[in-house]
Image (tube, rainbow, N blue to C red):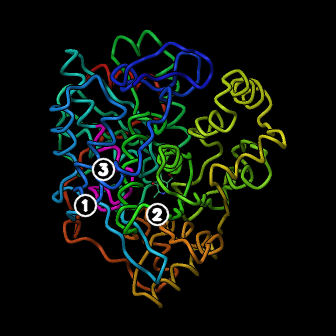
């Protein structure tokens, strides 16, 4: 399998070539040259496979430059009950007939990003050792992504993490999750500013190309193809658990921000997984809902980007969306380039033609959005009727799933985080503290390891140079 860019660079690269990269050199995103079709016999053979075996089968269709035995070992050591809590790894939790949650949040940081990031940590360590290279991952976080990256990379050979976060602005729980890590290769930098200051520092450091090269600076963005690929697996796992035969279809509802999670669902559907609908749910930051309702994609400015109680979906633009648009346009790279480079980068928006917009339905997409009041009502209703506590992001997904449900097709709502991560909203909705997994009792009291720094890119560079 080879990979190409969505913006016309036809250089065909192998999986290992793009594993450690972000954007393609022409500014596009990497996609496989085609989606392997999974026929009915293969899907039938996959029924009953344990999660790591299913993951190995799917990944093998896209990775042909890592020896099978090595890939099998990497996958098997990633998806274990010790790390993900159950033998099923992503078990279904029934709510009512035809409506269930798929638990993706039982990894170390209690959000679905662990599903991909844990594999990425093992792939990075393997590939860096194979090349005799090292990598320093630099990132900015307000919570979920940074902690998932740190728990994936902790103790890994050849990798160090430098993670910037706004000092004193994360919840006590999120701080404890990140700052209690004592691994020598994990560096938490608490910046005396807001999240945007952290992001600006990352940009300033990355724009210093000489520094970037000298210190082998890299990232673990959600645009990384390997992350997306790892997420394709749980759509298959959810489908196979929810159905008894390949004649049946299901729909998935996905709380969405950067379009990484649901893009994996799109890939699964393109491979032939019998998915009726992909239901995209946003919060008040409804960039994507607007596109799927109107055909206009318009990125938002800072003033129009709301801070909500489902903060991991607070986006102004959706960094993986270009992958879907490329497929929607029949893989016309020139047109994709026009829309994303010329129209979005220069004018902040594009509108697809009526013919192009009509094809959205062929890809199964429908959408909706949810507000803070909707989240509270959904959390309360789900707790009262089913005794199940859900987090704010999952609540966005469930709210829109109910609106977009077809009574004849089972609906699977992806649970993207556990409620304990967003305790304030749970207390507001239910008047009680969220349940906390036993392993995380009292983590706020653990010793913390972090460095406080002013908003100063030079100081951060010095810190990296001293510790890389
Ligand atoms: C990252 C995240 C999302 C959004 O996922 P995308 O892949 O960016 O669409 C939703 N919920 C939670 C809890 C997250 O951490």
Would you identify the image quadrant in which residue 375 lies?
A: bottom right
Q: CA distance from mark 3 to mark 2?
A: 45 Å
Around disc 1, counting alpha carbons within 10 Å, would you say few (fewer than 14), some (14 to 19), or many (20 or more)?
A: few
Around disc 3, counting alpha carbons within 10 Å, would you say few (fewer than 14), some (14 to 19), or many (20 or more)?
A: many
Residue 183 seen from this side: yes
Magenta segment, which residues?
Answer: 105-120
The residue drawn where x is 47% and y is 12% is 209
In what quadrant of the picture does the N terminus appear? top left
The residue positioned farthest toward the front in the image shown: 41
Around disc 2, counting alpha carbons within 10 Å, would you say few (fewer than 14), some (14 to 19), or many (20 or more)?
A: few
Whether label 3 touches label 2, CB < 8 Å: no
Q: Secondary structure beneath disc 2?
A: loop
In what quadrant of the picture does the C terminus appear? top left
Q: Is 342 on the left or on the right of 225, as rendered?
A: right
Is residue 225 placed above or below 14 in the rendered structure? Answer: below
Q: Secondary structure beneath disc 3?
A: helix
Residue 354 place in picture, x, y as percent: 84, 43
The residue positioned farthest toward the bottom in the image shown: 384
Give the camera-side residue of 181 and 339: 339
Closer to the eye: label 1 or 2? 2
Residue 107 place in picture, x, y as percent: 28, 57
Residue 59 place in picture, x, y as percent: 32, 38
Residue 467 seen from this side: no
Q: Secondary structure beneath disc 1?
A: loop
Closer to the eye: label 1 or 3? 1
Quickly name the residue at label 3: 178
Give the camera-side residue of 125 and 88: 88
Quickly name the residue at label 2: 247
Quickly name the residue at label 1: 48
Q: Earlier in the sequence, mark 1 or mark 3?
A: 1
């Amino acid at each position: 399998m080879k990979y190409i860019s969505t913006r016309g660079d036809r250089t065909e690269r192998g999986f290992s070539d793009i594993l450690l990269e972000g954007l393609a050199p022409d500014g596009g995103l990497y996609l496989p040259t085609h989606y392997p079709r999974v026929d009915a016999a293969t899907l039938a053979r996959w029924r009953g496979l344990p999660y790591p075996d299913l993951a190995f089968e799917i990944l093998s269709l896209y990775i042909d430059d890592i020896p099978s035995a090595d890939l099998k070992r990497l996958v098997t050591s990633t998806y274990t009950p010790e790390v993900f809590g159950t033998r099923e790894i992503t078990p279904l939790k029934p709510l009512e007939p035809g409506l269930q949650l798929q638990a993706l949040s039982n990894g170390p940081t209690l959000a679905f990003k662990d599903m991909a990031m844990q594999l990425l940590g093992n792939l990075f360590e393997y590939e860096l050792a194979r090349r005799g290279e090292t990598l320093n991952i630099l990132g900015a976080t307000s919570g979920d992504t940074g902690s998932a990256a740190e728990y994936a990379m902790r103790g890994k050979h050849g990798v160090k993490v430098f993670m910037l976060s706004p000092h004193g602005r994360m919840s006590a729980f999120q701080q404890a999750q990140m700052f209690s890590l004592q691994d020598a290769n994990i560096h938490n930098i608490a910046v005396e500013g807001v999240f945007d200051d952290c992001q600006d520092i990352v940009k300033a450091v990355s724009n210093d190309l000489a520094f970037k090269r000298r210190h082998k600076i890299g990232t673990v963005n959600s645009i990384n193809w390997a992350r997306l690929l790892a997420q394709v697996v749980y759509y298959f796992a959810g489908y196979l658990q929810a159905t008894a035969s390949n004649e049946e279809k299901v729909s998935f509802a996905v709380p969405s921000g950067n379009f990484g999670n649901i893009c994996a669902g799109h890939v699964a559907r393109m491979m032939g997984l019998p998915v009726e609908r992909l239901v995209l749910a946003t919060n008040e930051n409804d960039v994507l809902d607007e596109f799927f309702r109107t055909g206009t994609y318009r990125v938002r400015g800072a003033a129009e980007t709301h801070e909500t109680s489902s903060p991991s979906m607070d986006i102004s633009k959706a960094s993986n969306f270009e992958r879907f648009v490329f497929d929607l346009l029949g893989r016309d790279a020139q047109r994709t380039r026009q829309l994303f480079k010329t129209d979005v980068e220069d004018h902040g928006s594009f509108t697809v033609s009526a013919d192009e917009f009509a094809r959205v339905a062929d890809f199964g997409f429908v959408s909706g959005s949810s507000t803070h009041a909707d989240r509270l009502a959904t959390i309360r209703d789900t707790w009262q009727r089913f005794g199940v506590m859900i987090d704010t992001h999952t609540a966005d997904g469930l709210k829109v799933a109910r609106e977009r449900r077809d009574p004849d097709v089972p609906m699977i709502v992806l649970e993207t985080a556990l409620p304990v991560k967003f305790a304030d909203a749970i207390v507001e909705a239910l008047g009680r503290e969220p349940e906390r997994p036993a392993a995380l009792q009292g983590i706020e009291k653990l010793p913390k390891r972090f460095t406080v720094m002013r908003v100063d890119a030079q100081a951060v560079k010095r810190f990296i140079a001293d510790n890389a």
